[in-house]
Amino acid sequence: MKKIYQAVTIFMFLCFLGSQINFTKAISPGVSPGNEFFYDIEYVWNSTNQSIVIPEQVLDLNNTDFYKIKITEIEEKNVSFQTLWRFLNGTEIEGTGNINLETGIAGFGDFWAIIGGNLNSGERIHPIYPDHVFINETQVRNYGSGGNRETNLVDLTFTYVDPDDPSRYYVEYSQTYFDKQSGMLVELIDKTVYTDPAATETLTWKIKETNIWVVPEFPSGLIISLFMISSLIGVVYYKKKNKINTQQIFPK
C-alpha cells in the first residue's frame, strides 16, 4: 500500500512539473530593448473626515508630468528597464528595475506591471508562481495614438482586516489592463475603500505615449508608383477625351 501511495505521489508531482514546463514554454516577452512607455498618474482622495492628513508624498502623485519606462535588456524571461519619474516642477527621479515574467518577482525597482505577450483569457500571468492570478478577459479599448488595442484585464479584490479590531478593515478593488501584444501596462484603476475612518482613495495610471504604436508610413517607392499610375490614368483619360472632342468637331 505504501508503494502504491509513493507511486501516486510521484506521478502527481511529475504531472505538476510537466504542467509548469508547458506553461513556461508559453510565456515569452512581448517587449524589446528600446521600447518606451510614458504614463499619466492621478490620485483622488474622498473623505468626510476633515482631520485626516494625507501624506505629502501621496499628494505629489498629482504633480507628475510623466512616468517613463524604457526597456533596456531581455534575457530569456527576465526584463530589465530604466524608469524616469518627472514632475511638473522639473524634478526627476531615475531608477532601474528587473522582473521575471514567469514568477512576477521584481529583482529590484518598484515597477511590476509587465507580463508575457499575447496571453489569452483564462491563462495565468505568472505560470510558476503560486499567486494563481489569471487573465479575466480580453477587451478592446482605445488609447489615443494607439487606436483600438486588445487589452488583457486582471480584475482583483482584496480585503484587509485589522487583527486587533475586526470592525476596522478596508477593501481594495484593482483593475489592471495590459496591452495584449506587448504585455505592458496600459491602464491601472486601483480603488481602496476604508471603513474607519470612512474614506476612499483612487490611484490611476494610464499610458499617454509609446514608440511601439507608431503609425506606419507609406514607403517612398510605393508613393512614386501610385503617382506614376495616377499620372498614366490621367494621360489616357486626356487622350481619350481629346479624341472624342476631335471626332465631334471633325466627323469622318
Image (cartoon, rainbow, N blue to C red):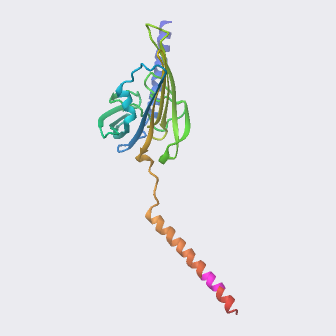
Q: Please report the residue visible at 29 percent of the width from the left and 38 percent of the height from the top.
A: 91
- Determine which quarter of the picture holds residue 182: top left
Instruction: State the count of labels.
Output: 0
The answer to whether any part of residue 183 appears in the image is no
Q: Please report the residue visible at 43 percent of the width from the left and 24 percent of the height from the top.
A: 129
The answer to whether any part of residue 57 appears in the image is yes
In the image, residue 4 above or below residue 25: above
Task: Indicate left or right for 166 with 84 as reference.
Answer: right
**Residue span colored magenta:** 239-244
In the image, residue 81 above or below residue 52: below
**193 or 246: nearer the eye?**
193
x and y, in percent, of residue 133 in the image: 49, 25
Furthest residue to the front? 50
Q: Please report the residue visible at 53 percent of the width from the left and 35 percent of the height from the top.
A: 120
Quadrant of the snapshot with the C terminus: bottom right
Task: Indicate left or right for 206 with 69 as reference.
Answer: right
